[in-house]
Amino acid sequence: MSFFERVEHTADLAVVVRGGDLPVLFANAARALFQMMTESPAARDRTREIALESVDLESLLVDWLNELIYLHEVEGETYADFRVNALSPTTLTATVTGGATTRKLKTIKAATYHDLTITETEAGAEAHIVFDV
Protein backbone atom coordinates (compact mmCIF):
# COMPACT_ATOMS: atom_id res chain seq x y z
CA MET A 1 0.00 0.00 0.00
CA SER A 2 1.26 3.49 -0.89
CA PHE A 3 2.07 6.05 1.78
CA PHE A 4 -0.54 8.37 0.24
CA GLU A 5 -3.47 8.33 -2.13
CA ARG A 6 -5.59 10.98 -3.75
CA VAL A 7 -9.25 10.91 -2.78
CA GLU A 8 -12.32 12.44 -4.39
CA HIS A 9 -13.02 16.06 -3.52
CA THR A 10 -15.41 18.43 -5.27
CA ALA A 11 -13.18 21.46 -5.85
CA ASP A 12 -9.77 21.07 -4.26
CA LEU A 13 -7.20 18.30 -3.95
CA ALA A 14 -7.59 15.79 -1.11
CA VAL A 15 -5.24 13.03 0.05
CA VAL A 16 -5.02 10.38 2.72
CA VAL A 17 -1.47 10.05 4.05
CA ARG A 18 -0.17 7.20 6.21
CA GLY A 19 2.85 6.70 8.44
CA GLY A 20 4.08 4.19 11.00
CA ASP A 21 4.07 6.97 13.61
CA LEU A 22 3.40 10.71 13.74
CA PRO A 23 6.90 11.87 12.67
CA VAL A 24 6.74 9.54 9.66
CA LEU A 25 3.20 10.75 8.92
CA PHE A 26 4.40 14.38 8.87
CA ALA A 27 7.36 13.47 6.62
CA ASN A 28 5.07 11.49 4.30
CA ALA A 29 2.59 14.38 4.11
CA ALA A 30 5.42 16.64 2.94
CA ARG A 31 6.63 13.99 0.50
CA ALA A 32 3.11 13.61 -0.94
CA LEU A 33 2.78 17.38 -1.30
CA PHE A 34 5.95 17.66 -3.36
CA GLN A 35 5.22 14.56 -5.45
CA MET A 36 1.95 16.18 -6.51
CA MET A 37 3.47 19.65 -7.12
CA THR A 38 6.82 19.07 -8.82
CA GLU A 39 9.32 16.72 -10.32
CA SER A 40 12.05 15.63 -7.93
CA PRO A 41 14.99 18.07 -7.93
CA ALA A 42 18.01 17.12 -10.03
CA ALA A 43 20.34 18.11 -7.18
CA ARG A 44 19.95 17.87 -3.43
CA ASP A 45 22.19 20.77 -2.54
CA ARG A 46 19.88 22.84 -0.33
CA THR A 47 19.13 21.98 3.29
CA ARG A 48 16.84 23.92 5.62
CA GLU A 49 16.11 23.57 9.31
CA ILE A 50 12.49 24.25 10.18
CA ALA A 51 11.10 24.91 13.66
CA LEU A 52 7.39 25.50 14.20
CA GLU A 53 5.08 26.00 17.13
CA SER A 54 1.30 25.77 16.93
CA VAL A 55 -1.79 25.32 19.10
CA ASP A 56 -2.44 21.61 18.41
CA LEU A 57 -1.36 18.69 16.25
CA GLU A 58 -3.77 19.42 13.38
CA SER A 59 -2.68 23.07 13.23
CA LEU A 60 0.94 21.95 13.35
CA LEU A 61 0.42 19.72 10.30
CA VAL A 62 -1.22 22.56 8.35
CA ASP A 63 1.54 24.99 9.42
CA TRP A 64 4.25 22.48 8.41
CA LEU A 65 2.81 21.95 4.94
CA ASN A 66 2.14 25.66 4.41
CA GLU A 67 5.71 26.54 5.47
CA LEU A 68 7.00 24.13 2.83
CA ILE A 69 4.67 25.60 0.19
CA TYR A 70 5.88 29.09 1.14
CA LEU A 71 9.56 28.11 0.85
CA HIS A 72 8.86 26.38 -2.46
CA GLU A 73 7.21 29.51 -3.88
CA VAL A 74 9.55 32.16 -2.43
CA GLU A 75 12.88 30.34 -2.69
CA GLY A 76 12.14 28.28 -5.81
CA GLU A 77 13.10 25.09 -4.01
CA THR A 78 11.70 21.58 -4.22
CA TYR A 79 12.34 19.25 -1.30
CA ALA A 80 12.70 15.50 -1.57
CA ASP A 81 14.08 14.40 1.80
CA PHE A 82 12.22 15.11 5.04
CA ARG A 83 13.48 14.28 8.52
CA VAL A 84 11.28 15.18 11.48
CA ASN A 85 13.79 15.55 14.31
CA ALA A 86 11.32 16.25 17.12
CA LEU A 87 7.54 16.33 17.27
CA SER A 88 5.13 17.09 20.09
CA PRO A 89 1.44 18.01 19.87
CA THR A 90 2.45 21.68 19.53
CA THR A 91 6.05 21.81 18.21
CA LEU A 92 8.05 20.43 15.31
CA THR A 93 11.68 20.61 14.27
CA ALA A 94 12.70 19.14 10.95
CA THR A 95 15.41 19.08 8.33
CA VAL A 96 14.44 19.22 4.67
CA THR A 97 16.78 18.73 1.72
CA GLY A 98 16.22 19.44 -1.95
CA GLY A 99 17.27 21.66 -4.78
CA ALA A 100 16.11 24.19 -7.33
CA THR A 101 12.66 23.56 -8.75
CA THR A 102 13.01 22.22 -12.28
CA ARG A 103 9.42 21.52 -13.34
CA LYS A 104 6.09 22.25 -11.67
CA LEU A 105 3.29 19.77 -12.17
CA LYS A 106 0.51 21.47 -10.18
CA THR A 107 0.14 24.67 -8.21
CA ILE A 108 -0.96 24.04 -4.64
CA LYS A 109 -1.79 27.24 -2.80
CA ALA A 110 -2.21 25.94 0.75
CA ALA A 111 -3.03 23.11 3.09
CA THR A 112 -6.43 23.75 4.68
CA TYR A 113 -8.37 22.83 7.80
CA HIS A 114 -11.31 21.62 5.70
CA ASP A 115 -12.07 17.96 6.59
CA LEU A 116 -8.64 17.72 8.28
CA THR A 117 -8.24 14.66 10.49
CA ILE A 118 -5.32 12.88 12.11
CA THR A 119 -6.13 9.45 13.50
CA GLU A 120 -4.22 6.63 15.13
CA THR A 121 -4.59 3.32 13.28
CA GLU A 122 -3.37 -0.23 13.84
CA ALA A 123 -0.61 0.50 11.31
CA GLY A 124 0.39 3.84 12.89
CA ALA A 125 -1.18 7.15 11.93
CA GLU A 126 -3.31 8.49 9.08
CA ALA A 127 -4.26 12.00 8.00
CA HIS A 128 -6.92 13.29 5.63
CA ILE A 129 -5.69 16.58 4.13
CA VAL A 130 -7.36 18.96 1.69
CA PHE A 131 -5.22 21.35 -0.35
CA ASP A 132 -6.39 24.57 -1.98
CA VAL A 133 -5.36 24.49 -5.66
Image: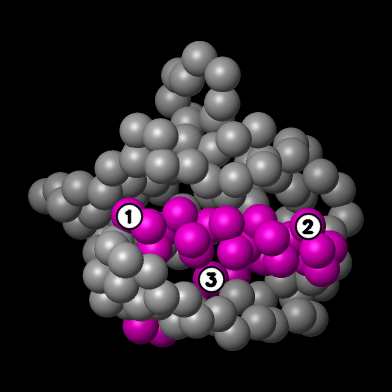
Residue placed furthest toward the left: 122
Q: Say whether residue 34 is left or right of residue 82.
A: right
Reading the image, the residue beneath label 1 is 58
Reading the image, the residue beneath label 2 is 73
Residues drawn in magenta: 58-86
Task: Report how far apart the C-alphas of labels 1 and 2 lie in the structure.
Answer: 23 Å
Q: The residue under label 1 is which amino acid type? A: Glu
Task: Report how far apart the C-alphas of labels 1 and 3 lie in the structure.
Answer: 19 Å
**Coordinates of residue 78 in the picture (x, y in percent):** 74, 62
Q: The residue under label 2 is which amino acid type? A: Glu
Reading the image, the residue beneath label 3 is 82
Residue 106, relative to residue 56: is it above or below? above
- The circle on residue 86 is none
Determine if the magenta segment contains residue 67: yes
Determine if the magenta segment contains residue 83: yes
Residue 91, relative to residue 108: is it above or below? below
**Coordinates of residue 128 in the picture (x, y in percent):** 35, 39
